[in-house]
Image (cartoon, grey):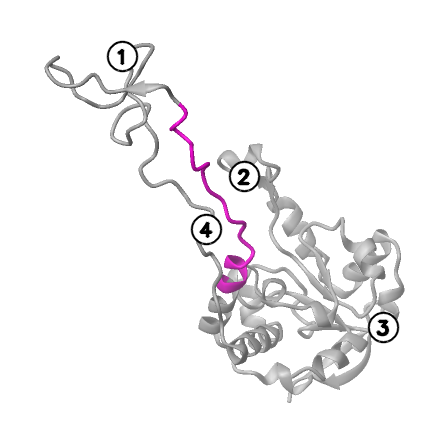
Amino acid sequence: MVKVNVYSLDGSTREEITLPSVFSTVYRPDIIHKSFNVLRANKRQPYGASPIAGLRHATASVGKGRGMSRVPRLTQGRQAALAPCVVGGRRAHPPKVEKKWKEKINKKEKILARNSALAATSIRELVINRGHKFKSDITLPVIIEDSFEEINKTKEVIKVFEKIGIYDDIIRAKNGTHIRAGIGKLRGRRYKTPKSILIIASKDNLLKSSRNLPGVDVVKPEQLNIEHLAPGGIGGRLTVITKSALELLGGKN
């Protein structure tokens, strides 16, 4: 079993504990990626064109014997309309709202993906490969004492991260924030921010004190899913877990 340090708010090592057996799950990137794709597919909102899109025109065919193609044309002019094969006509196969976007995954595969992604947070090589920045001498995942859950101010969270040696990852996310390419800039998602630290805590205080930190997510153990642990379907996210939350995670495997 893997042993890790429990850090206090001043960055010192308070004690050493053994990680729960769930952190010994074999790393399965294929199952993690599959579970992530299913989760994203099930969050998609159905969309489609109006059933009468492109059909709201007064049209008529000119008939035979005029030396013209007999496609439908506007009654007020010679512009073709209505048919999908002409300029100004309807779409031949528009998106339909009745299309099924939902995907399924076996329950055991879903549990394996979650446990595997959780175990990946303790593998240093995977965390480094995701691009996270942290001190080389800390143990992963970062386990911190329960008094961390009582912090109500963002500046105090920053101080704790600086003392432990993981605040550089938030700076990386801040510097990596950039304007999205494409039409998404006009649709309420102008900026993209890299993911940084995941905080798993058993109380809600940290949600308010950490939500303004770039790339930081705060989640309770019972709300944890593959999108938190493996953004983009890639395991190895830098994770901070409070001691009480770690006990709850150990009881769910």
Indicate which label's residue lies in the foreground, 1 or 3: 1
Find disc 1 in the rendering and name its residue. 78
In the image as oriented, which residue stretches furthest toward the bottom?
1
For the residues labelled 3 and 4, the Cα–Cα distance comes to: 48 Å
Task: Report the disc number at residue 180.
Answer: 2
Q: Quadrant of the C terminus?
A: bottom right
**Earlier residue among tags 1 and 3:** 1
* Among the two numbered marks 2 and 3 on one chain, the one whose residue lies closer to the N terminus: 3
The tag earlier along the polypeptide, 3 or 4, is 4
- First in sequence: mark 1 or mark 2? 1
Which of the numbered marks, if any, corresponds to residue 98?
4
Q: Residue at x 59, y 84 (%)?
A: 24
Q: Identify whether 121 is placed above or below 100.
A: below
Which residue is outermost to the top? 77
Tell me if label 1 and label 2 are in contact, CB under 8 Å: no
Q: Amino acid at mark 3?
A: Asp
Name which residue type carries label 2: Arg
Give the image location of residue 164, x and y in percent. 77, 65
Taking depth in this image into account, of 127 and 223 the one nearest to the observer is 223
Q: Label 4, secondary structure: give it.
A: loop
Front one among 28 and 39: 39
Figure quadrant of residue 143: bottom right
Q: Which residues are magenta?
A: 37-56
Residue on which disc 3 sits: 146
